[in-house]
Image (cartoon, rainbow, N blue to C red):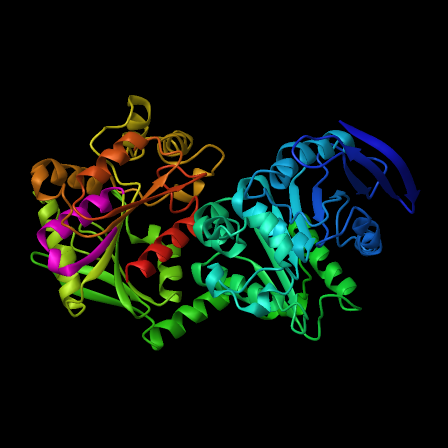
């Protein structure tokens, strides 16, 4: 239970002190809350604001001027800010279980703050400075679905992912006595790494991207505790795997001193931009350059520089159109049932930017490739893929197939193992058919006589997770092609494609897929010949690509790099 000790009201803000009884850590735990208005509403944001090592709830009072400044100039919306007194806890569940600070914050402190302030339904944010920023990052990356944003100012993050590689420079901030209490004596290396924000960000990158967690990192380039090096490592890891974030290295910034206050204001304004969904606009620039016009100009420049080209490849029986983008290890993209390569536009962009050469194949029966789809089999479609790889120099390539494209990828790996380096199967069916309702909806998406409302209803039920907008897939359905592809699968003996060769494979499963069940995916993994990895993407249905583009790209990129 939270008890109130005192209240200070000044200038439209309310600062209150209290304490919370608990058995998880030494208690009762003192805390402070700062509210920007006396008219608290249930949907007000809540920011858990964590102090540095050895600090207390008084940290919130020292930051009050920065919060008040942002509230005054409307760069930050009204919200509840809460700071617990956590001393040298590092906000960590100790390795020996003697103090469970992280559990306390999640299970007791956050609910108590919401109940106490009445902000029960607003978005949850977390942030801090120094050790508080370290704790905020750790908790946000462990449970990204709980938070809307994390802001980390000069986080005490080591610039290595294993303890034996941490330079002595990065151990200055963590006294040996504190370290042994937190991570054991001798130090438990696995436990240390399991709580390292950078290791967590990499391991949970798919969930972080799928949650749409907004991330703000900042450090000073003259920090006497040297935390800029670990912050830079975290930034580089997030950048390389494609997790969106904002990163700032402040010129002349130290761990303390006059630069800290303005840097906190910048961090708070990041939250304001996120919650207000506004940015500083310059109408003159907007008038000069329209985004669509600029994009069209860039496409032209990409063609001129051969970064993006369109080629016609002569297949075994038909001409095939392939869009080639980027350079590096080849990756061939194979679209879903009755659909074309446009579904892969976002993934193609991200793969090419990351240093891969992407070949997006338009299937037989789609404009650009031959319209001849009579009496085809999966073997014919696999030979088309092989022809494209041969035309590209015969370099063994990664295959990325969505739904039916995954069946084509498996057949190609079985028939042409020398041309397939590895595979990624996105929402690819296994041996168990879907339940009747989504199966019927799937078939109805290809019925041209449906009204727009009926069509979208079928698309939503078959392909999209609850709450996701099916309008993005209102077009792109080819019933003639879908029928031919299904017949091709029926004409092909199972042994011609089921094994998928002996190549390593990543299966990306949408967590809310109504077409392919978790059990069907498990059986699919058992059918494959090579080493199989599985990633589950939350907040996505069978469509997957338009629902969680960042999460899909991160899963694919991370795996391809490890298997390159």
Direction top: furthest residue: 436
488 or 241: which is nearer to us?
241
Q: How many labels does the image show?
A: 0
Q: For the view shown, which residue lies furthest in the bottom direction? A: 305
Point out the stretch of residues depicted in magenta: 403-423
- Of the pair 214 and 287, the residue shown nearer to us: 214
Q: In which quarter of the image is the N terminus?
A: top right
Instruction: Say which quarter of the image contains residue 5.
Output: top right
Q: Quadrant of residue 222?
A: bottom right
Q: Where is residue 180 in the image (x, y as percent from the top left)?
A: 58, 51
Q: Can residue 517 be seen in this view?
A: no
Whether residue 413 appears in magenta in the rendering, the answer is yes
Could you tell me what secondary structure mostly forms the magenta stretch? helix
Percent of width and height locating residue 35: 81, 41
Quarter of the image for the C terminus: give it: bottom left
Classify residue 192 as left or right of residue 114.
left
* 275 within the magenta span: no
Q: Is residue 545 visible?
A: yes
Q: Report the side of 267 relative to 207 (left or right).
A: right
- In the rendered image, the vertical position of residue 95 relative to residue 161, given as above or below: above
Residue 241: x and y in percent read 43, 59
Q: Residue at x 32, y 32 (%)?
A: 518
229 up-or-down from 523: above or below: below
Q: Which residue is drawn at 53% across and 61% down?
A: 234
- Residue 360 position within the rendered picture, expressed as x and y whole percent measured from the top left: 27, 58
Who is closer to the viewer here, 22 or 441? 22
């Amino acid at each position: 239970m939270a008890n109130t000790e005192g209240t200070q009201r000044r200038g439209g803000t309310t600062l209150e002190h209290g304490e919370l009884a608990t058995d998880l850590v030494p208690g009762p735990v003192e805390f402070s809350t700062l509210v920007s208005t006396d008219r608290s509403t249930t949907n007000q944001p809540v920011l858990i604001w964590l102090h540095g090592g050895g600090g207390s709830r008084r940290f919130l009072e020292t930051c009050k001027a920065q919060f008040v400044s942002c509230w005054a100039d409307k760069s930050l919306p009204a919200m509840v800010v809460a700071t617990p007194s956590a001393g040298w806890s590092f906000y960590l569940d100790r390795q020996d279980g003697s103090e469970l600070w992280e559990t306390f914050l999640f299970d007791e402190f956050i609910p108590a703050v919401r109940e106490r302030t009445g902000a029960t339904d607003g978005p949850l944010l977390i942030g801090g400075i120094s050790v508080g920023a370290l704790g905020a990052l750790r908790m946000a990356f462990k449970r990204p679905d709980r938070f809307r944003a994390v802001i980390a100012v000069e986080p005490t993050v080591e610039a290595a992912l294993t303890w034996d590689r941490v330079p002595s420079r990065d151990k200055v901030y963590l006294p040996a006595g504190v370290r042994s209490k937190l991570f054991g004596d001798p130090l438990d290396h696995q436990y240390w790494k399991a709580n390292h924000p950078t290791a967590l960000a990499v391991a949970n990158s798919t969930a972080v991207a799928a949650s749409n967690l907004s991330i703000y990192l900042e450090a000073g380039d003259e920090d006497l505790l040297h935390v800029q090096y670990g912050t830079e490592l975290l930034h580089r890891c997030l950048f390389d795997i494609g997790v969106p974030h904002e990163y700032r290295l402040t010129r002349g910034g130290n761990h303390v001193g006059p630069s800290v206050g303005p840097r906190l204001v910048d961090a708070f304004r990041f939250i304001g931009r996120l919650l207000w969904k506004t940015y500083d606009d310059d109408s003159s620039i907007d008038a000069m350059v329209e985004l669509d016009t600029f994009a069209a100009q860039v496409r032209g420049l990409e063609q001129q520089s051969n970064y993006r080209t369109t080629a016609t490849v002569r297949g075994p029986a038909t001409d095939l159109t392939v869009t080639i983008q980027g350079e590096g290890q080849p990756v061939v993209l194979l679209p879903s049932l009755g659909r074309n390569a446009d579904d892969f536009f976002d993934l193609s962009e991200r793969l090419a930017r990351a240093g891969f050469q992407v070949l997006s194949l338009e299937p037989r029966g789609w404009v650009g490739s031959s319209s001849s789809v009579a009496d085809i089999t999966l073997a014919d479609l696999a030979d088309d893929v092989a022809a494209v790889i041969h035309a590209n120099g015969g370099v063994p390539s990664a295959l990325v197939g969505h739904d039916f494209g995954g069946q084509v990828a498996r057949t190609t790996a079985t028939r042409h193992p020398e041309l397939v380096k590895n595979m990624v199967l996105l929402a690819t069916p296994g041996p168990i058919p879907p339940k009747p309702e989504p199966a019927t909806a799937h078939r109805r998406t290809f019925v041209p006589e449906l009204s727009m409302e009926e069509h979208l209803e079928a698309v939503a039920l078959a392909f999209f997770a609850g709450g996701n907008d099916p309008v993005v897939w209102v077009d792109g359905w080819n019933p003639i092609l879908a029928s031919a592809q299904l017949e091709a699968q029926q004409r092909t003996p199972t042994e011609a494609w089921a094994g998928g060769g002996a190549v390593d494979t990543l299966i990306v499963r949408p967590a809310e897929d109504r077409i392919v069940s978790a059990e069907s995916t498990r059986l699919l993994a058992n059918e494959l010949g090579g080493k199989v990895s599985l990633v589950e993407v939350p907040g996505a249905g069978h469509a997957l690509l338009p629902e969680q583009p960042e999460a899909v790209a991160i899963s694919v990129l991370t795996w391809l790099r490890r298997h390159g």
